[in-house]
């Protein structure tokens, strides 16, 4: 289980364009890495659009926003285009990033136990260490909360 002060796992995942992305390439910059269950679903759309609407404020504070879900690059690209999202989306198809961050968990949906992504956000410092972890995030209002605490 990751905790504040831990080195953030260095993930290698494809972006929505199919380009290779490595988190360690962001060293020297703060990163808001948010995991969400599925592109273009109600809660995930609310969360992504709130990050979109606040992106200038995140940039002003020196933080990059990056979204991660187990969707395919094409689904991420469609989601990004549909909502004009100005940040990178990662296609964690094999859930390796989610597992590295401990957010691929058993959840209860409609009374059944299923494995899935628990909506979680990590603020990673310029030094690559985890500064803050938001567990079991409620989508509405989350971007503002993260922004206030940056």
Image (spheres, helix red, strand yellow):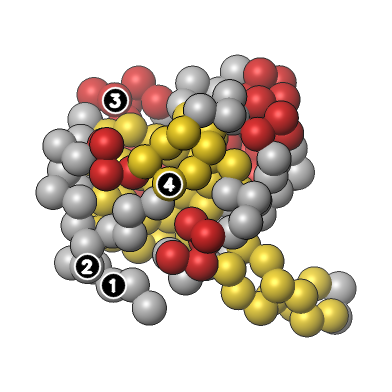
| Mark 2 / mark 3, whichever is N-terminal | 2
Vertical comparison of 150 with 118: above or below: above
Question: In this rendering, would 99 be left or right of 77?
Answer: left
| Mark 4 / mark 3, whichever is N-terminal | 4
Crowd class of label 2 (few under 14; some 14 to 19; many from 20; radius 10 Å): few
> Answer yes or no: do the residues labelled 2 and 4 have beta carbons within 8 Å?
no
Rendered residue at 43%/46% (across/down)? 12
Judging by the rendered image, the residue that carries numbered circle 2 is 6
Marks 1/3: CA distance?
Answer: 25 Å
Rendered residue at 73%/34% (across/down)? 75
Disc nearest the viewer among 1 and 4: 4
Q: If the image is split into quadrants, where does the N terminus sit? A: bottom left
Residues 103 and 25: in front is 25
Marks 1/4: CA distance?
Answer: 21 Å
Marks 2/4: CA distance?
Answer: 18 Å
Judging by the rendered image, the residue that carries numbered circle 1 is 3
Judging by the rendered image, the residue that carries numbered circle 3 is 59
Judging by the rendered image, the residue that carries numbered circle 4 is 12
Vertical comparison of 128 with 62: above or below: below
Please provide percent x and percent y for residue 88: 48, 30
Residues 37 and 91: in front is 91
Question: In this rendering, would 10 be left or right of 114?
Answer: left
Disc nearest the viewer among 2 and 3: 2
| Mark 2 / mark 4, whichever is N-terminal | 2
SS class, disc 2: loop
**Looking at the image, can residue 43 be seen?**
no
SS class, disc 3: helix
Please provide percent x and percent y for residue 51: 48, 34
> Answer yes or no: do the residues labelled 1 and 2 have beta carbons within 8 Å?
yes
SS class, disc 1: loop
């Amino acid at each position: 289980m990751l905790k504040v002060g831990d080195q953030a796992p260095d993930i290698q995942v494809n972006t929505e364009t199919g380009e290779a992305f490595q988190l360690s390439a962001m060293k020297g910059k703060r990163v808001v890495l948010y995991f969400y269950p599925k592109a273009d679903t109600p809660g995930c759309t609310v969360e992504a659009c709130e990050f979109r609407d606040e992106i200038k404020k995140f940039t002003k504070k020196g933080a990059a926003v990056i979204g991660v879900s187990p969707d395919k690059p094409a689904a991420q690209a469609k989601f990004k285009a549909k909502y004009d999202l100005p940040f990178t989306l990662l296609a964690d198809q094999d859930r390796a990033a989610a597992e590295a961050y401990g957010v691929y968990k058993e959840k209860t949906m409609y009374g059944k136990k299923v494995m899935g992504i628990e909506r979680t956000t990590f603020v990673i410092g310029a030094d690559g260490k985890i500064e803050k972890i938001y567990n079991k995030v409620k989508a509405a209002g989350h971007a503002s909360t993260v922004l206030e605490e940056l």
